[in-house]
Image (cartoon, rainbow, N blue to C red):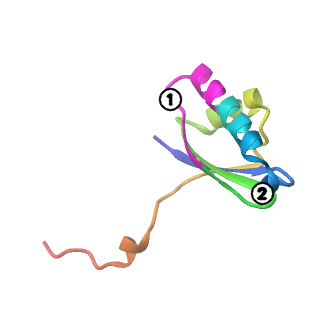
């Protein structure tokens, strides 16, 4: 299933209190439960003025529906083409 990175512009995001982040997370989880098991929230990164959220969903439309129902901005949605990490730099094993 496709993975998406969602950029959410939220001025002051880095200054949100733990209680505010908990409330946002609970609202997100409530909407995910409404939408069903096809969409999964993997994790989010909070920066000064943005959240970068990673979701697994069948399509971008479902990601947008989650944002709409939750009242979250979804300023930019990108489908992940591939994933790399430090092991990508290693030579492939000879077979």
Quadrant assignment for the N terminus: top left
Q: Quadrant of residue 23?
A: top right
Disc 2 or 1, which lies upstream in sequence? 2
At 47% from the left and 59% from the top, the residue drawn is 82
Q: Quadrant of residue 49?
A: bottom right
Looking at the picture, does residue 3 appear above or below residue 68? below
Residue extending furthest left?
95
At 70% from the left and 30% from the top, the residue drawn is 27
Q: Secondary structure at mark 1?
A: loop
Which residue is tagged 2? 14
How many numbered dots are placed on residues in this image?
2
Residue 18 horizontal side relative to residue 2, left or right: right
Residue 10 horizontal side relative to residue 35, left or right: right
Q: Which residues are magenta?
A: 29-43
Residue 38: numbered disc: 1
Looking at the picture, does residue 29 appear above or below residue 73? above
Residue extending furthest right?
11
* Front one among 68 and 94: 68
Quadrant assignment for the C terminus: bottom left
Residue 30: in magenta span: yes
In three-dimensional space, the C-alpha distance between marks 2 and 1, rounded to whole angstroms, equals 29 Å
């Amino acid at each position: 299933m496709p993975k998406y990175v969602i950029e959410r512009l939220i001025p002051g995001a880095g200054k949100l209190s733990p209680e505010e982040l908990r409330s946002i997370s609970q609202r997100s989880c409530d909407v995910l439960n409404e939408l069903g098991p096809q969409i999964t929230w993997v994790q989010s990164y909070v920066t000064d003025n943005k959240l970068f959220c990673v979701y697994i969903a069948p399509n971008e439309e479902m990601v947008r529906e989650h944002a709409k129902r939750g009242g979250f901005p979804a300023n930019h949605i990108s489908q992940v083409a591939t994933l790399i990490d430090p092991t990508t730099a290693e030579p492939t094993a000879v077979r």
